[in-house]
Amino acid sequence: MLFDSKIVNRIALTITVVFFAILITFLFKSFFIVKNQFINIDGATYVNQVRQDYYTQRLSNFLTKNCIGNELCEVQSMLDFVTRIPYKVNKSVARSPKHVVEQNFGDCDDKSNLLISLLKTKGYEAYFVFVPKHVFVIVKLKEKLANKKALYVNGQAYYKLESTAKNSRIGFPLKYKLEEIEAIIDPFKNKKLIVESLEYK
């Protein structure tokens, strides 16, 4: 059976158009993934590896399965999981949450990327805080914690989560001066927060 050359040409053209549409979509998405990985902080570039993927969603759901409706339980459960991962300096760029879990080690970059990814998949407002040679996570909670100081950013209370200290609790003490805070970053938007006021009380 012979095919009409017009039909063959139309099929070939359709396949070509679909291929280029898929290619352009892939390149477009790749551009924004890469763009959102690089954060400029005072002339230095930080490469984040935050994720909101299927793996991270499943892991956060598993870690918080016994905490229905209890935000302190959820946040502490995720923090406990991350702090149990052995601390080891990673001389390369930060690794993805999945690699940190599978390889079972990480430094402050790796573990903070994992922690903030878990928090984000559960809907928490959280940010990276950069200080000299270190990064930690802050999280906003619905209720103020008794006997715990908070970092107030533009009048809003956030509690420090230290991913590198074993058995650390929500509201880990801030051991840096406020003027040592280099930047507060939303790594999912690749955006530095404009800080108009900063207090620790």
Image: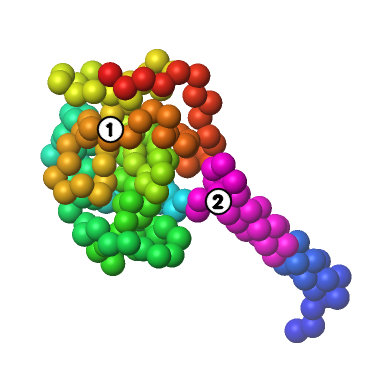
Residue 65 visible (yes or no): no
**43 sits left or right of 161 in the view:** right
**101 sits left or right of 90 in the view:** left
Mark before the other along the chain sequence, 1 or 2: 2
- Checking the image for residue 45, the label placed there is 2
Residue appearing at x 14%, y 45% in the figure: 167
Residue in the foreground of this view, choosing between 128 and 29: 128
Residue appearing at x 75%, y 67% in the figure: 16
151 is higher (above) or lower (below) than 75: above
Residue linked to disc 1? 174
Kind of residue indicated by mark 1: Leu
Neighbor class of circle 1 (other Cα within 10 Å; few <14, some 14-19, many 20+) is: some
Instruction: Give the foreground label among 1 and 2.
Output: 1
Q: Secondary structure at mark 2?
A: strand
Residue in the foreground of this view, choosing between 22 and 89: 89
Neighbor class of circle 2 (other Cα within 10 Å; few <14, some 14-19, many 20+) is: few
Where does the magenta region start and end?
Answer: 19-47
Kind of residue indicated by mark 2: Thr
The stretch drawn in magenta includes residue 37 = yes
- In the image, farthest residue toward the bottom: 1
Q: Quadrant of the N terminus?
A: bottom right
- In the image, farthest residue toward the top: 155
